[in-house]
Amino acid sequence: MPDGAATAHLYRPKLLSLLREGYRFDDLRRDAAAGLTVAVVALPLSMAIAVASGVSPDRGLFTAIVGGLVVSVLGGSRFQIGGPAGAFIVLVAATVTQHGVGGLLTAVLVSGVLLAVLGLLRLGALVRHIPHAVTVGFTAAIAVTILASQLKDLGGLVLAGPEPGLLIPKLAALSAAVGSLNPAALAIGVAVAAAILALRAWRPTWPGMLLAMVAASLAVWALHLPIETIGGRFGHLPRGLPTPSWPDLRLSAILPVLPAALSFTLLGAVESLLSAKVADGMTGRRHRSNMELVAQGVANVASPLFGGICVTGTIARTAANVRAGARSPVSGILHSLFLLLFMVVAAPLAAFVPLSALAGVLVVVAWNMAERAEIRRLLGDWRTAVVLLTTFGVTIAHDLISGIAAGCVVAASLALLGRRVPEEGA
């Protein structure tokens, strides 16, 4: 099986390579099954991530449909699945709070241009050389922040004012609102998280997230439980994609959101190439990092044109795609088309989904993001422990860019002192 190493430097989408090699009906059959499997996983996740990010759930679906399609058509990985990701929740929510949805769309488009430039400058390999302890550290910090951000909807809490963005003030505000706890909402949210984890252990091939969300929606509807739903907060989802339109690209609109755009660019590059690397490890193939960055860039330009948010390679959905038997990027294309079909046919049903159920889904996402075994391994060496804890602490206290910068500085300092930080797998 060719691994792509001889052409890893070329700007050639994997889909084009596939078509040159030949594509058979059996490949299409396997890709269709994988695409449907991934769409079932992506459906509840895309909506949950959008709601947690401070935007309406349809924007998550727009992101998965448009961004996912572009990533699969142009990407440098055969198996990458693009869409909204939990890692962006904190950054997107902060941008919406500061600049509104219009500012968010501008920031996403600018980050798309920057990602494409990174790829065209052949900087993909450099992005992949961020120390492993830094990656694990900021991922764990994002997981903790996501978990904290879901406590409000998980318990149906009513806050006295806007929910703070930073972790400590957020926990203080949530503690002050504990008297407004909705037992029914908490029960539904916890039940959804428990059901997903149980199904993953008992029947790993079943779509646990979708089944749990459907069951929760039916329970809330049948029992008339006093729990806020998607329809109650956002109204009905549209039955299809909106007409594309450009966000505000005036210099006066770009400059305020430039820091957010830089954050989206860095996280998008790291997350996408990590996801492609995971697919490589599962299949024995090798992705084209620079082509992948260009594809992610184009996807992040296309997504906000349809009202979507940040697009990146998604590790869990990409791994699910591989495990489901995908043979090519066609599975990712079909995953996007299946999601579009859902919007056209069944979008009104999403109005019945309780927000506490979506919070339960993201509690599981946060649990999965924290690489507990890897954290324990890295903490076993004082050098990697210092890098990991520095990255984690600064990300929690300040922001992602500061956390990554601090972690890289510590790692570089240790290396200069002749105390090299072990790489992944060392």
Image (cartoon, rainbow, N blue to C red):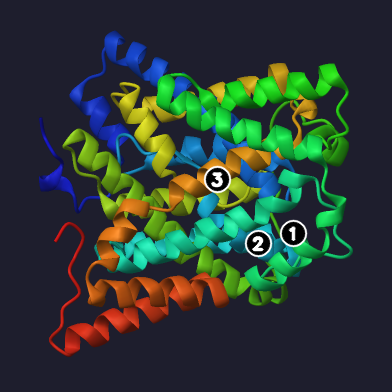
**What amino acid type should be assigned to the residue bearing mark 2?**
Thr
In the rendering, at what x and y percent does residue 316 appear?
42, 39
Camera-side mark, 1 or 3: 3
- Residue designated by label 2: 106
Q: For the residue carrying disc 1, how many other residues have a C-alpha within 10 Å: few (<14), some (14-19), or many (20+)?
A: some
- Residue designated by label 3: 84
If you read the primary sequence from the N terminus, does the residue marked by circle 3 or circle 2 appear first? 3
* Left-right relation of 166 to 176: left
> How many numbered marks, from 0 up?
3
* Left-right relation of 31 to 194: left
**What amino acid type should be assigned to the residue bearing mark 1?**
Gly
Residue at horizontal 36 percent and vertical 77 percent from the top = 407
Front one among 317 and 2: 317
Q: For the residue carrying disc 3, how many other residues have a C-alpha within 10 Å: few (<14), some (14-19), or many (20+)?
A: many
State the image quarter where residue 138 is shown. Answer: bottom left
Residue at horizontal 41 percent and vertical 27 percent from the top = 201
